[in-house]
């Protein structure tokens, strides 16, 4: 009886499998999983838009290996457990070939076990704190050595020796600053203070008073989201400006700069792998296409450029592997190189990008003008040698 | 820890206290006097911020920095109108059902946040303080930014206005009468329905005007209300529900405690220290700093 039942089940599942692959003939499903509501929506909606733009472009040009991409869009709702639930749904119910998504480290860390358990593949487009290296995640945003450390080097090269670290109170700023502190000590510079404010915090009087007492040369700012608006308003009210106490930020891109207001941010610095003002042809094409679809004044940021390029990277890897199977794609993606809006990038064996680093100064309309860039491209290092000695990718 | 730093922190305490007070004053009316647990109170502050932005857009080109004087009445009236509509359509049907009110107003807060997102986008809008608020008063080595002083003055003015209205006007007498004994006040001819509407709208209006001040030092975006709501309730509860003066004392006290905790430990630790102190305080004085006395039965 049990044998008969198992035969029946097997037959039934074969029939179902045949039916599902027949219906999927000519298309391939991918997931786009970002916060479309809640506090992170401000940043993530535009990143989802950028991925959608790339998918539309690829479909218009004939798809991937002759198949049109069908997007299954899910809302992570700025809630980390929701990201895990939605990722599970995308992998097990929709059976997507890959997922593009995530912004906060908390959302990534909550999705990671889901992707590892189900053998899925996630393209993560945002700069992060490193100290993590899952074979199921392609980390295309900057590793610490592709944003935080080059920014520190640049500050030191400008003669700024006393450094104040200010950040939001969660994993990314704390880990990034842990790494920075090791390097500040190694370079014989001075750490003149370190403070964290709750995400969404709006009160900076004490922080500014502490800055006043510490008299730093420069502030390295890992505040996230709207806390930046409060900080810069109160920093300016206290009589500071870029010429007297420059601030280098890691989470302020063109969109945030527009929201903070040029008047507050003028002359301040940011370090990224991409600025909207980069003059390369791939970027000009990307900016024009995005603004045509989402509005002429739309600001374009580093995570958006990464998300856009991630879709093209996935396409290239699928075509190289001649398969949509996630782990085959993961294997094939290593070594892929392309001219993207970020310039020339290459996927390193650890699944991150070899890419250039730019420091820009903020000006009119929330745009940044590049004032310094890395010599060539920088190889990604998930585990900082000083902060996490001996740790390597599996 | 030198003298300059400590005097700077004392000013910080005053400044934080004034912001807490501004955030809480409207709530002192709706929650303090009417016992309406209004989770959408933060959104009235947000509405005040957006109306400041609109005032700057409309009046800025002709009036320049004087747009601020247009922003205050606009924010007050706009938020008051919204409060009146909310009271008339939802709150009034839920009096005496605090749990339902809590859920309904929480829902309204989400609706208002999404409305702001639809109208102005999920990115915040820029509001910059007028140039004449840009400087700072220099007392020795201590810097007192004009915009902070302005917010302190605004909190004092709003507090004074509310005190006068509640303690010296006929309207205020009715409000206090209804607060102490609703049935008796109604029996003596006070129209409690329209009074409820007025008090709630006034609380919303005060929050709207406070939102103008907050917009000068904090962001204006769909979720900014959530940053204030917890602290606003904290101030009202510590001060003593029903006591506007208690709220004022509590706000300044909490401001100083925050500033000292932030000054001598770290900013991230200070919030936790503050909450522990508040919990301990409420164990000791569950009815707050200045408890209201009443002979009504449900208060006994």
Image: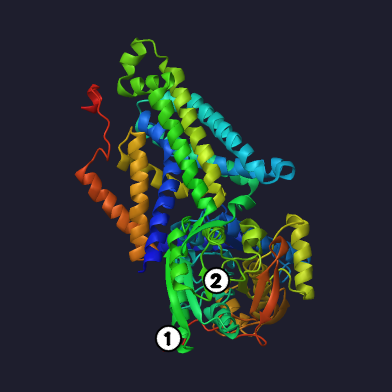
Quarter of the image with the N terminus of chain B in it = bottom left
Label 1 marks which chain's residue? A
Tell me which corner region of the image, top left, top right, bottom left or bottom right, holds residue A303: bottom right
Cα distance, mark 1 to mark 2?
Answer: 23 Å
> Residue A15: where, in percent of width, then height?
56, 60
**Mark 2 = which residue?**
A121
Identity of the residue drawn at 42% across and 28% down? B164
Q: Position of residue B63 (x, y in %)?
A: 71, 42
Which badge, 1 or 2, is on the more N-terminal residue? 2
Q: For residue A300, which quarter of the picture?
A: bottom right
Classify mark 2: helix, strand or loop: loop
Q: Are marks 1 and 2 on the same chain?
A: yes
Nearest to viewer (mark 1 / mark 2): 1
Instruction: Tell me the SS state at disc 1.
Output: loop
The residue marked by circle 2 belongs to what chain? Answer: A
Say whether marks 1 and 2 touch (CB < 8 Å): no
């Amino acid at each position: 009886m049990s044998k008969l039942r198992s035969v029946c089940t097997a037959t039934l599942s074969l029939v179902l499998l045949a039916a599902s692959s027949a219906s999927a003939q000519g298309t391939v499903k991918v997931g786009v999983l970002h916060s479309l509501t809640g506090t992170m929506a401000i940043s993530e909606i535009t990143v989802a838009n950028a991925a959608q733009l790339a998918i539309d472009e690829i479909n218009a040009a004939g798809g991937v290996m002759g198949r049109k991409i069908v997007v299954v869009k899910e809302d992570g709702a700025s809630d980390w457990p929701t990201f895990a639930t939605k990722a599970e749904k995308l992998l097990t119910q929709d059976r997507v070939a890959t997922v593009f998504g995530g912004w906060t480290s908390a959302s990534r860390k909550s999705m990671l076990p889901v992707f590892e358990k189900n053998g899925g593949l996630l393209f993560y487009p945002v700069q992060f704190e490193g100290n993590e290296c899952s074979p199921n995640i392609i980390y295309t945003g900057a590793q610490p050595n592709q944003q935080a450390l080059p920014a520190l080097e640049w500050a030191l090269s400008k003669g700024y020796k006393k450094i104040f670290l200010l950040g939001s109170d969660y994993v990314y700023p704390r880990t990034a600053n842990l790494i920075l502190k090791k390097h500040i000590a190694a370079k014989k510079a001075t750490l003149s203070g370190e403070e964290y404010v709750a995400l969404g915090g709006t009160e900076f009087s004490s922080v500014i008073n502490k800055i006043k007492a510490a008299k730093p040369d420069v502030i390295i700012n890992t505040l996230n989201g709207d806390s930046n608006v409060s900080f810069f308003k109160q920093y300016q009210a206290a009589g500071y400006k870029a010429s007297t106490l420059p601030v280098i930020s890691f989470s302020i891109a063109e969109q945030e700069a527009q929201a903070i207001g040029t008047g507050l941010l003028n002359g301040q610095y940011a370090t990224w792998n991409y600025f909207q003002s980069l003059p390369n042809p791939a970027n000009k094409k990307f900016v024009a296409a995005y603004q045509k679809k989402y509005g002429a004044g739309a600001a374009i940021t580093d995570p958006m450029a990464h998300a856009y390029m991630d879709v093209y990277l996935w396409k290239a890897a699928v075509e190289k592997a001649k398969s949509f199977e996630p782990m085959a794609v993961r294997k094939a993606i290593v070594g892929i190189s392309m001219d993207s809006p970020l310039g020339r990038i290459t996927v390193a064996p650890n699944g991150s990008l070899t890419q250039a680093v730019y420091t820009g100064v903020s000006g009119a309309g929330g745009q940044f003008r590049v004032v310094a860039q890395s010599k060539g491209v920088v190889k990604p290092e998930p585990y900082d040698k000083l902060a996490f000695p001996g740790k390597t990718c599996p | 820890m030198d003298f300059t730093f400590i005097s700077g922190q004392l000013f910080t305490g005053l400044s934080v206290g004034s912001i807490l007070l501004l955030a809480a004053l409207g709530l002192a009316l709706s929650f303090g006097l009417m016992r309406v647990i209004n989770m959408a109170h933060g959104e009235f502050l947000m509405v005040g911020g957006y109306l400041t932005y609109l005032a700057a857009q409309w009046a800025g080109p002709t009036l320049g920095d004087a747009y601020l004087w247009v922003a205050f009445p606009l924010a007050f009236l706009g938020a008051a109108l919204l409060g009146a509509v909310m009271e008339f359509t939802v709150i009034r049907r839920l009096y005496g059902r605090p749990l339902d009110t809590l859920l309904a107003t929480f829902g309204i807060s989400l609706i208002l946040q999404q409305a702001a997102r639809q109208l102005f986008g999920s990115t915040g809008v820029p509001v910059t303080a007028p140039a004449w608020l840009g400087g700072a008063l220099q007392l020795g080595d201590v810097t007192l930014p004009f915009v902070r002083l302005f917010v302190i003055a605004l909190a004092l003015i709003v507090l004074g206005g509310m005190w006068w209205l509640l303690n010296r006007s006929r309207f205020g007498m009715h409000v206090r009468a209804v607060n102490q004994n609703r049935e008796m006040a109604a029996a003596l001819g006070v129209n409690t329905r329209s009074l409820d509407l007025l008090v709630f709208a006034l609380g919303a209006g005060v929050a709207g005007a406070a939102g103008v001040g907050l917009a000068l030092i904090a962001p204006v975006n769909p979720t900014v209300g959530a940053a204030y709501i917890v602290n606003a309730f904290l101030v009202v509860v510590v001060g003593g529900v029903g006591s506007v003066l208690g709220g004022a004392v509590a706000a300044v006290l909490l401001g100083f405690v925050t500033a000292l905790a932030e000054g001598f430990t770290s900013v991230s630790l200070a919030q936790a220290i503050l909450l522990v102190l508040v919990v301990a305080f409420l164990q000791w004085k569950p009815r707050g700093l200045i408890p209201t006395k009443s002979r009504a039965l449900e208060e006994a």
